[in-house]
């Protein structure tokens, strides 16, 4: 059991560190958008690369922050009944949901995105816009990394749910 807790802890620390680093990209995005707006309205000019960089930064924030959001239970969840569940029932939902939905979905997306990114790298894909960003394949590889971080956090959550289920199961047996 200690091994499972340690694995979950290592995954937590990875996503915590990545999430804190990525949070600085929000500042960069705000500064970039501000600069773009100033140049657009004061100087009547805008560059394709600034617009592309804006959505690249947003994508990185979203992708690399997904595992961090899950770690802090800030991800999207339909809490119609979940909030009223006991710790054991929440653990059961998280365990089954993680095994049946999250882990297979992440695996499928990683597989598909890897092929997509490799093809982009193979052809040295660039922005179709004149003056756009080179090396578009970098952002496509970010999909793989971001979903991998989410997969890792999903595994940590499944391990924690399993440990909670084992603990509550042994407590129930002790009461009998």
Image (tube, helix red, strand yellow):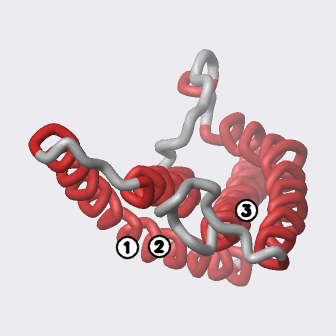
Pick the front one: 91 or 117: 117
Q: In 3D space, how far apart are the residues under numbered discs 1 and 3 (Cα atoms)?
A: 19 Å
Q: Residue 124, how many percent across, how many down?
A: 74, 76
Tell me the distance, in whole angstroms, between the alpha carbons under discs 1 and 2. 5 Å
How far across and how far down the image is residue 115, in percent?
Answer: 89, 67
Above-or-below relation of 11 to 77 = below
Corner quadrant of residue 121: bottom right
Quadrant into which the C terminus falls: top right
Q: Cα distance, mark 2 to mark 3? A: 14 Å
In the image, residue 31 sits, relative to residue 117, either above or below, namely above
User: Which numbered disc, 1 or 3, marks the residue that appears first in the sequence?
Assistant: 1
What element does badge 3 sit on? Answer: helix
Residue ID for mark 1: 21
Left or right: residue 127 compared with residue 116: left
Q: Residues within 10 Å of mark 3 (few under 14, many from 20)?
A: many
Q: Is residue 167 visible?
A: no
Residue, disc 3: 151
């Amino acid at each position: 059991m200690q091994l499972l807790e340690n694995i979950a802890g290592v995954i937590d620390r990875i996503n915590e560190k990545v999430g804190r680093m990525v949070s600085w990209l929000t500042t960069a995005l705000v500064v970039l958008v501000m600069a773009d707006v100033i140049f657009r309205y004061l100087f009547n000019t805008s560059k394709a690369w600034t617009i592309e960089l804006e959505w690249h930064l947003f994508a990185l924030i979203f992708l690399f922050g997904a595992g961090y959001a899950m770690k802090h239970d800030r991800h999207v969840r339909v809490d119609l009944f979940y909030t009223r569940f006991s710790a054991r029932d929440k653990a059961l939902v998280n365990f089954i949901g993680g095994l049946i939905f999250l882990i297979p979905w992440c695996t499928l997306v990683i597989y598909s995105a890897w092929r997509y990114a490799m093809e982009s790298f193979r052809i040295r894909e660039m922005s179709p816009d004149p003056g756009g960003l080179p090396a578009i394949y970098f952002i496509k590889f970010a999909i793989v990394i971001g979903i991998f971080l989410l997969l890792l956090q999903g595994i940590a959550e499944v391990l924690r749910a399993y440990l909670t289920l084992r603990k509550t199961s042994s407590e129930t047996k002790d009461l009998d």
